[in-house]
């Protein structure tokens, strides 16, 4: 069975890595946005191993090993497996989203929602990390060591990013619907410096459908990706 209850009692809390990041003085808002935008645009590609925990709204979870490649702002490939058995394979490009799901109906009902939840994480992550700070219409507020950067989207939603003032690193994105309700949250942490660029290795996405935790390892930024890295497999099904 793929889904297991989340067990936390009796487990030692893993020690978080110490972040050793460059710091910035009390720069003005325009300078802070410029630094954030330049850093985001410097990332042309990402490849990494990943450990995923997908938790449904009812608390059941599946833990998977995986691999991710990304080319911000709109290309992502995420594969995941458990006990050396492929669980899902999703590809996101400007042309759409493709998912490889099991043929067996019972397994398909369990895996496809997890794939689509991971796709939501990937879509928002790739978009926000790639272009958010270079958009027009940004509003910046100081909030006790944090810069709250917000932007209203054309569809009425509002994105707010909380940026650590000291290191100028995004720590949390929140997506609000037109009524002001939070519909999606993406927390970023455990930053490291890879190829001279600060990048998070821990992501925690939450929505009404559940939660996805991602821990990256063997991170490589701006390395060469395979020519077919974002070519959907022949068995992949395009999603609506």
Image (cartoon, grey):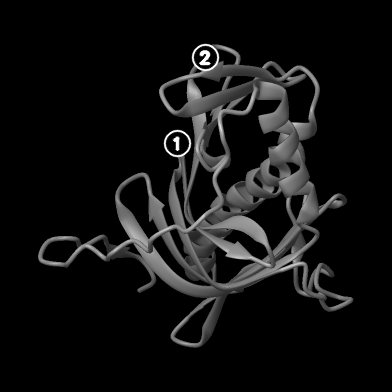
Check disc 1 and report its element: helix, strand or loop. Answer: loop
| Mark closest to the chain's N terminus, 2 or 1 | 2
Furthest residue in direction front, as rendered: 25
The residue tagged 1 is: 208
Q: Of discs 2 and 1, which sits in the foreground? A: 2
The x, y position of residue 84, in whole percent, is 50, 88
Query: How many angstroms separate mark 2 from mark 1 (CA)?
Result: 15 Å
Task: Give residue 97's position: percent from left, percent from top.
Answer: 75, 54
| Residue 36 image point, x, y percent | 69, 39
Tell me what residue is drawn at x 64 percent, y 47 percent.
125
Q: Quadrant of the N terminus?
A: bottom left
237 up-or-down from 80: above or below: above
Q: Residues within 10 Å of mark 1 (few under 14, many from 20)?
A: few
**Location of residue 120 with respect to 175 vertically, above or below:** below
Asked where in the image residue 88 lies, by quadrant, the reply is bottom right
Answer few, some or many: residues within 10 Å of disc 2's Cα (few below 14, many 20 plus, some between 14 and 19).
Answer: few
Q: Nearer the viewer, residue 67 or 217?
A: 217
Q: Which mark is residue 180?
A: 2
Is residue 176 visible in the rendered structure shown here? yes
Residue at 52%, 54% (x, y): give it: 21
Farthest bottom residue in view: 84
């Amino acid at each position: 069975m793929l889904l297991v209850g989340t067990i936390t009692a009796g487990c030692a809390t893993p020690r978080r890595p110490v972040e050793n990041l460059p710091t910035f003085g009390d720069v003005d808002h325009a300078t802070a946005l410029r630094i954030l935008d330049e850093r985001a645009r410097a990332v042309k590609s990402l490849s990494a191993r990943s450990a995923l925990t997908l938790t449904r709204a009812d608390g059941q979870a599946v833990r998977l090993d995986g691999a991710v490649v990304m080319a911000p702002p709109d290309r992502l490939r995420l594969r995941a497996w458990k006990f050396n058995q492929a669980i899902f394979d999703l590809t996101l490009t400007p042309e759409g989203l493709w998912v490889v799901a099991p043929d067996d109906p019972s397994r398909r009902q369990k895996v496809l929602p997890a794939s689509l939840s991971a796709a939501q994480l990937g879509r928002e992550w790739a978009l926000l990390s790639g272009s958010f700070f270079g958009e027009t219409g940004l509003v910046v507020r100081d909030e006790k060591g944090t810069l709250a950067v917000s932007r209203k989207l054309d569809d009425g939603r509002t994105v707010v990013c909380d940026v650590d003032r000291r290191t100028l690193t995004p720590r949390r994105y929140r997506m609000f619907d037109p009524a002001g309700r939070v519909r999606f949250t993406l927390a970023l942490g455990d930053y490291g410096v890879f190829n001279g660029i600060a990048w998070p290795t821990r992501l925690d996405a939450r929505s009404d459908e559940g939660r996805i935790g991602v821990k990256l390892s063997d991170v490589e930024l701006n390395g060469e990706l395979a020519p077919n890295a974002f070519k959907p497999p022949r068995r992949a099904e395009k999603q609506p």
